[in-house]
Image (cartoon, grey):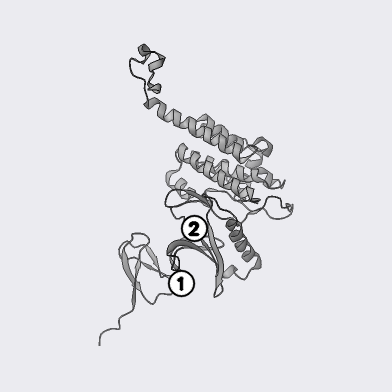
C-alpha cells in the first residue's frame, strides 16, 4: 500500500496572489510557506461570520487580520485580542474603549468600526480595512516624503482630530504608526486605545502613555491634556515624515523626553533645505513648547497647512507657465492669463 495522502487545502497567498495548497491539517491561524514565493500563508479560521485569511499587523493588545465577512460579502479587518491578556479586566476595558471611541466617530479619515463582540472566549473588533501601509512604513521606505504628500496627510488627519474633538475625544497617541492608508491612498487614524474625554480630570499620579518622540511637553509636565497635545503630536509626525528626522533625537528615551521640554526645535527648512517657509513655519508653530503659542484651533492649523499647500503648488507650477514672447507688446488686455 502507498503512503497515506495528507489532506490539502487550497488558499490564496497574500504576498504573490497565487492559489496554492497548504497542509489541510494545519491548526487555524497556523502558517505554512507559499510554494510559489516562499511567503507565509495562514490557515484560515472562522470567527462567527468572519473568515480570518491573513495577518496584517500585530501589537500589544492583539493581532489584526484581513478577513472576509461571509454575511455581507466584503473585506474587513478583525482585531483579535490576545488570549494572555483577555482575563485582565483593565486590558479588556481598554480594548472595549477603543471600540466605543471609534464607533462614535464618522469621518473619512478615521477608521470605521463595525462591531465589537466575543465568540468562544475570543474578544474581537471588526473594522474597515486599511492595509496599504502606514505613514511609518512610508517613512522607513522613503526616509522623507514629498512636501505636498505630507501637507495632504496633515490636512486630512487634522480634520479627523477636529471631528473627534467635536465628540469630546482626544486621541493622545498620534504617531506615524497610527496613520494607515487604504487602497485608495486615504489616510486613516487608528488606535484610539489611549483616547479619553477632553473634559476628563487629569490624574497627576497616573502613568503617562504615549510615544516619546511625539509627546507634547505639557503632558510630560502633567499640566493636563487638551487637543493641543494631539496637535503637537501631529505636527511632530508631519515633521518626521517631511524631514526624515523626529523633532528631537537623543541617545535615550529620557533624553528625548527632556528635549521636548528644554531643547529649541530646529525648523524643518533648516533640517531639509527645499522645504518651503510656510510649511516650516506652520509646523514650528504647532510644535511650540508653550501650548498657548500654538494654533488656537484645528481650523487655524488646517488653514495654515492649506495655505502652505497652495503656495507650494504655485511655486511648483508657476515656472512651467510662461507668457507668450509678445506678451509685453500685446498689453494687459491680451495677457495670457485672461485669454
Q: Where is residue 271 in the image (x, y as percent from the top left)?
A: 51, 34
Q: Which class describes the residues within 10 Å of circle 2: few (<14), some (14-19), or many (20+)?
A: some
Q: In this view, does 324 lie to the left or right of 74?
A: left
Q: Where is residue 34 in the image (x, y as percent from the top left)?
A: 34, 65
Give the structural element (helix, strand or loop) at label 1.
strand
The residue identified by callout 2 is 128
Residue at 52 percent across and 33 percent down: it is: 308
Circles 2 and 1 in contact, beta carbons < 8 Å: no
- Circle 2 or circle 1, nearest the eye: 2
Instruction: Classify 4 as above or below 319.
Output: below
Quarter holding residue 42:
bottom left
Q: In this view, does 187 lie to the left or right of 319?
A: right
Residue 318 circle label = none
Q: Where is residue 7 in the image (x, y as percent from the top left)?
A: 34, 78
The answer to which of marks 2 and 1 sits earlier in the sequence is 1
Q: Position of residue 30 (x, y in %)?
A: 43, 70
Task: Identify which residue, 278 or 321, lies in the foreground.
Answer: 321
Residue at 39 percent across and 64 percent down: it is: 40
Amino acid at each position: 500500500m502507498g503512503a497515506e495522502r495528507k489532506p490539502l487545502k487550497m488558499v490564496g497567498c497574500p504576498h504573490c496572489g497565487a492559489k496554492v495548497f497548504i497542509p489541510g491539517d494545519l491548526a487555524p491561524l497556523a502558517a505554512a510557506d507559499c510554494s510559489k514565493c516562499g511567503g507565509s500563508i495562514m490557515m484560515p479560521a472562522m470567527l462567527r461570520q468572519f473568515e480570518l485569511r491573513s495577518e496584517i499587523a500585530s501589537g500589544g493588545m492583539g493581532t489584526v487580520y484581513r478577513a472576509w465577512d461571509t454575511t455581507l460579502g466584503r473585506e474587513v479587518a478583525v482585531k483579535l485580542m490576545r488570549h494572555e491578556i483577555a482575563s485582565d479586566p483593565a486590558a479588556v476595558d481598554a480594548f472595549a474603549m477603543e471600540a466605543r471611541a471609534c464607533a462614535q466617530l464618522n469621518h473619512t479619515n478615521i477608521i470605521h468600526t463595525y462591531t465589537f463582540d466575543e465568540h468562544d472566549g475570543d474578544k474581537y473588533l471588526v473594522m474597515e480595512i486599511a492595509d496599504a501601509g502606514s505613514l511609518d512604513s512610508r517613512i522607513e521606505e522613503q526616509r522623507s516624503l514629498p512636501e505636498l504628500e505630507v501637507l495632504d496627510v496633515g490636512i486630512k488627519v487634522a480634520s479627523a482630530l477636529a471631528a473627534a474633538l467635536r465628540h469630546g475625544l482626544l486621541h493622545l497617541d498620534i504617531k506615524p504608526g497610527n496613520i494607515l492608508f487604504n487602497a485608495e491612498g486615504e489616510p486613516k487614524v487608528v488606535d484610539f486605545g489611549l483616547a479619553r474625554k477632553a473634559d476628563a480630570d487629569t490624574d497627576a499620579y497616573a502613568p503617562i502613555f504615549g510615544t516619546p518622540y511625539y509627546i507634547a511637553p505639557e503632558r510630560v509636565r502633567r499640566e493636563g491634556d487638551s487637543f493641543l497635545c494631539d496637535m503637537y503630536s501631529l505636527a511632530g509626525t508631519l515633521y518626521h515624515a517631511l524631514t526624515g528626522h523626529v523633532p528631537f533625537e537623543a541617545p535615550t528615551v529620557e533624553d528625548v523626553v527632556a528635549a521636548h521640554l528644554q531643547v529649541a526645535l530646529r525648523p524643518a527648512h533648516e533640517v531639509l533645505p527645499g522645504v518651503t517657509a510656510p510649511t516650516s513655519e506652520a509646523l514650528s508653530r504647532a510644535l511650540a513648547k508653550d501650548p498657548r503659542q500654538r494654533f488656537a484651533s484645528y481650523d487655524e492649523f488646517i488653514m495654515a497647512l492649506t495655505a502652505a499647500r497652495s503656495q507650494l503648488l504655485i511655486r511648483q507650477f508657476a515656472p512651467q507657465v510662461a507668457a507668450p514672447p509678445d506678451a509685453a507688446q500685446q498689453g494687459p488686455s491680451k495677457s495670457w492669463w485672461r485669454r
